[in-house]
Amino acid sequence: MTTLDLWPIGNCQVSALVDRAGRFVWGCVPRVDGDPLFSSLLGGEAPESGYWGIALEDSVSIEQEYIRNTPILVTTHRDSHGGAIEVIDFCPRFQREGRTYRPVAFARIVRPIAGSPRVRIALRPTCGWGGGCREQVGGSNHLRLLLDTLALRLTTTAPIAMVQGEHAFRVERPLHFFLGPDESFQGDLASTVDLMLYRTTQEWQGWVRGLAVPLEWQEVVIRCAITLKLCQHEETGAIVAALTTSVPEHAGSQRNWDYRFCWIRDAYYTVQALNRLGALDVLEGYLGYLRNIVDGARGGHIQPLYGVLGEAQLPERIEEALPGYRGMGPVRVGNQAAEQIQHDAYGQIVLCSVHAFFDHRLFRQSGVEDFEALERVGERAWAYYDQPDAGLWELRTRQSVHTYSSAMCWAACDRLANAAERLKLPERERLWSERAQVIRDRIESAAWREETRRMSATFGGDDLDASVLQLLDLRFLEADDPRFLDTLVAIEKGLRRGSTMLRYDTEDDFGLPETAFNVCTFWLIEALFLTGRSDEARVLFEEMLSRCTAAGLLSEDIDPQSGELWGNYPQTYSLVGMINCAAMLSKPWSSIR
């Protein structure tokens, strides 16, 4: 049965998800938001195409692990006669002649390690969202794949006719595969791909070496950080919410969304978590992307999400040729939420950007001109802090004044005051401080429900929502504030389901939600720790870690009863939650000195 127990590989240009059989089952070209060359993840229960498999005949066991501190996957296959191979999968990424080499390419190396193993290669790509590719032309050592938007070439040291015909053959020497641009491969394939593997390993391990990780749960944090970096389209700095589209939030829910775009909100949480680890390259890339978004808005409306190249138009459509995850369609491409009004984006842009006024490590520190551009975003926050929007959960059929959105607008004004102070602009500091206080007063009067002792999710109702816990992270409320403590009690009572948390428990566009939202559980863990319940927080954190896939990752949602993962994968929100909680809960490094 198809599951989300998948291993991501990638190079910040393209990526692939590898299943427990060692098959590429998801991967888009020429970017994460492109046409899936490998689409079998959404191909129903027994897809006949959309994958790249390297299968050992008479296989009895398969083991998988990453090369330490990299997204390079090693899959070891063993047969019943003592034969064994290892398959190394990666996307090349390293510095070459002063530039980052990250081609639209996937590399695989097959090494015999015992006995007389026989393999069968099945390269069955799809084009045009689940359709057949127009042409495969064989050469002496390559196959050409002609897609609608580009052509790719598989160059290999394996016998090409055996690959093309999917015939079994014995592996007596290492085999190399390079699926990349449709051009003649320069140099000796085997030695070049081996060198790519070495340099890609060095590149990733060098990046990890620069991370400031907590003492405990280091492997968890490192794996999450690597995967978050894979979610950044390095060319523009955009950070996508997940690598997939249309994995449903629960069985048959129709809650199937395309997450291969850059949400301002999700990206804010991502850079916030990576900043904790000192991964400033991701922040710097994203700030460049944000500056272009703000320039394009010209002081006007900021969308909740954009394409990885900054595209504003992301029309949503259904692709009928793919039946969907376990046959649970629809498969959606594009996302209508780009057309929504979500006022929290103004706060998230400011929160990300203000860091650059203070951090001396950055190549490009922000100055007065950047502040003036950011003030245009602040003006939007000031204008719309008490106006209805779709909220962070992107409700499609109703709008309210959401406490979370209003608090983000408050944060925009509050942090602009901090930046003005840094730049020695006292009049601007006073203006933004006064505006922040006005918004604070409004939230405290409109969202607090004295009769039920909790902060409501909306100004007009008395509804529970896990997002209100973020008032603590935003420094809007302190951990010892009776209003926060009472709100935490109410949210736990109303939304906690065992060791998981719902976003909310009221009907939305698709009825009552059935699965818990993983990042909400991590928000709960943070709140428990900061309010003095650290032992409970550690137990709950360890339980969440036990829900991870073999790759050490999480999707968006989880079934509170079965523990099964649902929703798009790997989900940046969930990885951020693991990093933040590990950093918060860990013993300090000084404890072992």
Image (tube, rainbow, N blue to C red):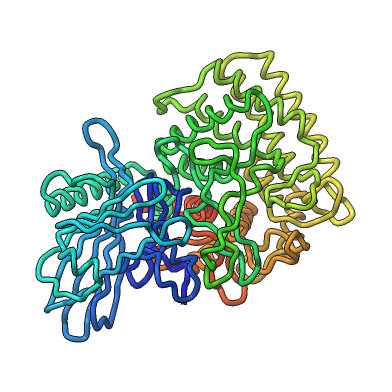
User: Can residue 239 be seen at all in this image of the molecule?
Assistant: yes
Q: Could you tell whether 570 is left or right of 440 in the image?
A: left
- What residue is drawn where x is 22% and y is 36%? 96
Q: Position of residue 377 (x, y in %)?
A: 65, 27
66, above or below 380, in the image: below
Q: Position of residue 77 (x, y in %)?
A: 25, 74
> Which of the pair 227/500 is nearer the observer?
227
- What residue is drawn where x is 71% and y is 18%? 430
> Which of the pair 507/182 is nearer the observer?
182
483, above or below 23, in the image: above
122, above or below 336, in the image: below
- What residue is drawn where x is 12% and y is 45%? 187
- What residue is drawn where x is 25% and y is 72%? 166
Q: Could you tell whether 469 is left or right of 39 in the image?
A: right
Q: Position of residue 54 (x, y in %)?
A: 27, 69
> Which of the pair 102/199 is nearer the observer?
102
Q: Could you tell whether 173 is left or right of 261 in the image?
A: left
User: Can residue 216 be seen at all in this image of the molecule?
Assistant: no
